Amino acid sequence: MTVHLHEGDLPGDVFAPGALAVDTETLGLNPLRDRLCVVQLSDGKGDEHLVRFRAGAYAAPNLVRLLADPARVKIFHFARFDVAVLKQYLGVDVRPIYCTKIASKLVRTYTDRHGLKDLAKETIGVDLSSSSNPRTGAAKP
């Protein structure tokens, strides 16, 4: 996997058409108080794109256009938080959305464990524990 770091916005046309996995990183869990630091995106083809933001610098027209594109499904885990943060800082209405946490709650009714760690372990056999490599599931050296 290649990780591409972008400052403030994505270059134009980074991704081919199709669904995108999206995640945000903030300084805390309150979207009104804790600023957006990074947006992570992947189209599942092996590359990951990180968009890093400086405090107060949230003009990202290429990223906003991508997140608002009605032809692309944006896949989140616990979309409620990420979508709120993206609306607060980028002013974007992210649509359409697929939330793996909501999907887990609808399908995996036999459990109350719907966190990404439990979902990844049960559905694809990947261990996301802090003692393993999240990309491979292998133990860290």
Image: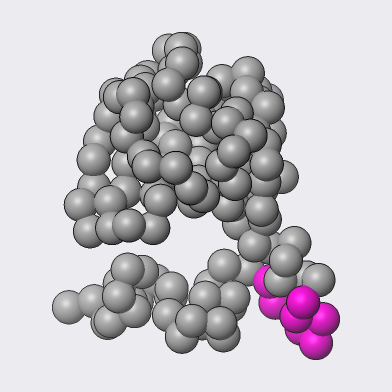
Magenta segment includes 108: yes
Q: Nearer the viewer, residue 55 or 7?
A: 7
Q: Nearer the viewer, residue 68 or 83?
A: 68
Q: From the image, which quarter does the C terminus lie in?
A: bottom left
Residue 132: image quadrant is bottom left
Q: Locate residue 62 relative to residue 80 in the image: left or right.
A: left
Q: Is 70 rendered above or below residue 40?
A: above
Q: Is 101 rendered above or below residue 33?
A: below
Q: State the residue at coordinates (50%, 30%).
A: 66
Q: From the image, which quarter does the N terminus lie in?
A: bottom left
Q: Main secondary structure of the magenta part?
A: loop
Residue 85 in sight from this viewpoint: no
Residue 53 coordinates in the image, percent (x, y): 39, 24
Residue 44 coordinates in the image, percent (x, y): 39, 58
* Range covered by the magenta-colored residues: 107-114
Residue 71 in sight from this viewpoint: yes
Q: State the residue at coordinates (20%, 52%).
A: 2
Magenta segment includes 122: no
Q: Locate residue 100 relative to residue 109 in the image: left or right.
A: left
Residue 92: image quadrant is top right
Q: Furthest residue to the left? A: 141
Residue 48 coordinates in the image, percent (x, y): 31, 48
Q: Nearer the viewer, residue 96 or 40?
A: 96
Q: Nearer the viewer, residue 43 or 37?
A: 43
Residue 112: image quadrant is bottom right
Q: Is 103 rendered above or below residue 74?
A: below
Residue 116 coordinates in the image, percent (x, y): 57, 67
Q: State the residue at coordinates (59%, 75%).
A: 119
